[in-house]
Image: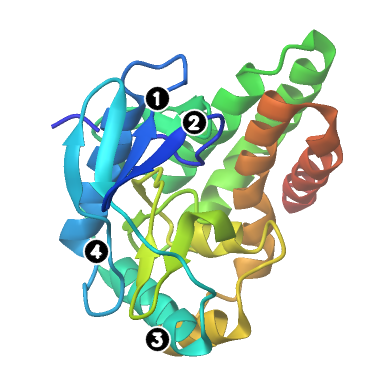
Amino acid sequence: MGIETSRPLKLDCNLIMDNFIKRNNTNFANALIMEAKGLEMLRRCCNPELIRIPELVQVDQKQLVMTMIRGKPCPSELAERLGRGLAELHKIEHAQYGFDEDNFIGLNPQINGFSDNWGDFFISRRLRYQIGLIECPSLRLEFESIIDKSEAVLGRFLNQHCAHPSLIHGDLWSGNYMSDDDDVWLIDPAVYFADREVDIAMTEMFGGFSSAFYGAYSESFPLTKAYPIKKQIFNLYHYLNHYNLFGAGYLEQCRHGLEVIEQLAT
């Protein structure tokens, strides 16, 4: 089964009866197929008593049909359930980092494959790939130079502070979870096996989740002492992606993330 798009950027979505139809207006024929694969991976690994995943009805290159979620504001009880459920998902130990197929992060490809080395994987298939997409030659060379000089120290740091590969949602901003009267749901994943704190870092990018979520997650699975630094490194990947998709409004955040990496190597 091939199957993801993460954020629903420029996708035309319609509601028909009790099904939600998401149409593929991207340039990638397999965008929705990979999204569906990500949803199925989450369904197999998430505890349905804590986190729900939409039921897939049908998927092809043109559209993804799944059960409709009648979204409502998320109360503290469901935010806590999301935190506990995500911690439970992250506690599951997997064999390697990465994923068996490339998928998508927003409207850019997300390069996968498998690796036994988290630091190498994140540097080469997350940071270097996004830096390679930068159109401005001088900026691309500037960022590549920072990674070149810092790669060995950065790789050791990331490996030292990662216990095991976890299945992550991969695009966990506030628009990619929903709640209804009874449950909390995850949608639009960009899944792969990674340091679990990649997910927590992204929740903080655009204003953060509720204190109920963070309290429940930390009680179930405390964050590492290195998380404040790791957060800035992990979110650099997403800021680079946003820069490549949306332009200079994200350049300052990219530079900040690279400065954090430079400071590790000094």
Q: Secondary structure at mark 1?
A: loop
Circles 3 and 4, Cβ within 8 Å, touching? The answer is no
Residue to which mark 2 is pinned: 11
Q: Nearer the viewer, mark 3 or mark 2?
A: 2
- Please state, as top left, top right, bottom left or bottom right, where the N terminus lies in the image: top left
Residue to which mark 4 is pinned: 93
Q: Secondary structure at mark 4?
A: loop
Q: What whole-number distance in Å separates the C-alpha atoms at marks 4 and 1?
A: 33 Å
Q: Position of residue 109 (x, y in %)?
A: 46, 24
Q: Check disc 3 and give the amino acid type.
A: Ser
Q: What whole-number distance in Å separates the C-alpha atoms at marks 3 and 2?
A: 35 Å
Q: Check disc 1 and give the amino acid type.
A: Asn
Q: Position of residue 64 (x, y in %)?
A: 28, 35
Q: 192 or 116: which is nearer to us?
A: 192
Q: Check disc 4 and give the amino acid type.
A: Glu
Report the side of 16 relative to 125 (left or right): left
Residue to which mark 1 is pinned: 24
Q: Check disc 2 and give the amino acid type.
A: Leu
Mark 4 or mark 1, which has the lower sequence index? 1
